[in-house]
Image (tube, rainbow, N blue to C red):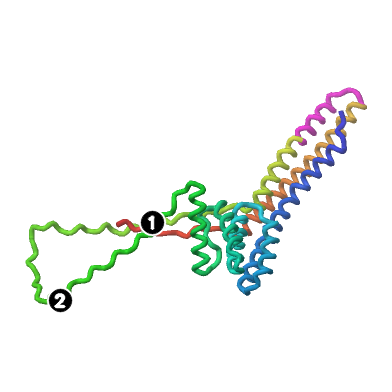
Amino acid sequence: MPRSPLHVRLVLALCILAVTAAPRAAHAQDAFNRYLTAAVRLYESLEYERAMEQLQRAKGLARDMKQDVAIALHEGIILADMGKREQSQTAFKTGLLLDPEAKLPLAVSPKVERDFEEMRARVNKELGRAPPPSPKEPKPPVIANKDRPEQQATTPDLNAPAPATPPPYVAGVAEPSRMRMPATSMVLAGVGVAALGVGTVFGLQSRSSVNEAQNTPFQDVTRSHWEDARSSANVANVLFGTAGLAAVGAVVTWVLSPKDSAPSTAKETQ
């Protein structure tokens, strides 16, 4: 049975749509970062209203929870400086419900930081989380009594046990940097795998049509099988080319993207 040209066009349209989705995702990420940076610059220039406008534009481009948390915390800071404490608390609560361990992204006044930590305690209570342990206050140093200079040195006890020798310093192993594949590379890699799989299916169909054409004695049927084979081969070649372009694009975007590295730390056993 000859393959419908509409079917071929639908497959090609799906491949083109998948390939163009990756640049759109990268463009949205870049636009989000630019709007958020503009909001921070305007906030530092005390232009709070314009900063909120840029935040609203960035909010429309947020695609994951990390970006939603960043928008909520920036809104809370700007609203607090605008004197809108209730709205600021609501924004802080929104960000902390998404990430109870979130930190303020900008330097703020002690009052705003205190409100933020109070809201964190309320959110932890609502979520049933244990509050973070409070830092222990250091003990005051022991001051020697200088009012008794007449104290004499006592004779050391030779039978007393020797003081314990502290263990040697042991350098901790630096944690390897964690390299995350950017979203654009992941999309391109997925497109490449999908195109390769579909192209393989069409390639097998083309081979099957060729075999049927060679084994059919009727000329009309043979011509139909040859047309099916040619159509499937063309689609397979387009899909293989798409897979190759997607793979190259994934590698290029991964190489050119900034890498997140965790700082190495050294541990000392005591």
Three-letter amino acid code at disc 2? Asp
Residue at image position (79%, 29%) is 208
Residue at image position (12%, 75%) is 148
Look at the image and give the residue range highlighted in magenta. Answer: 202-219
Query: Looking at this view, is 182 or 34 the one in front?
Result: 34
Residue 133, above or below 111: above
Mark 2 lies on residue: 147
Residue at image position (69%, 61%) is 56
Query: Looking at this view, is 227 or 3 the one in front?
Result: 3
Q: Secondary structure at mark 1?
A: loop
Among the 4 quarters of the image, the one containing residue 81: bottom right
- In the image, residue 63 lies at what x, y percent? 66, 53
Residue 119 on the magenta segment: no
Query: Looking at this view, is 261 or 140 the one in front?
Result: 140
**Apparent side of residue 52 relative to residue 213 in the rendered image (left or right):** left
Q: Secondary structure at mark 2?
A: loop
Quadrant containing the N terminus in the rendered view: top right
* Mark number displayed over residue 20: none
**Apparent side of residue 146 relative to residue 135 in the rendered image (left or right):** left
Q: How many numbered marks are there? A: 2
- In the image, residue 61 lies at what x, y percent? 69, 56
Q: Given the current orientation, which residue lies at the most extreme top position?
A: 217
- In primary-sequence order, the first of circles 1 and 2 is 2
What's the CA distance linking mark 1 and mark 2? Answer: 46 Å
Three-letter amino acid code at disc 1? Gly
| Number of the front mark, 1 or 2 | 2
Query: Looking at this view, is 17 or 65 the one in front?
Result: 65
Mark 1 lies on residue: 172
How crowded pointer 2 is (Cα within 10 Å; few <14, some 14-19, many 20+) is rated as: few
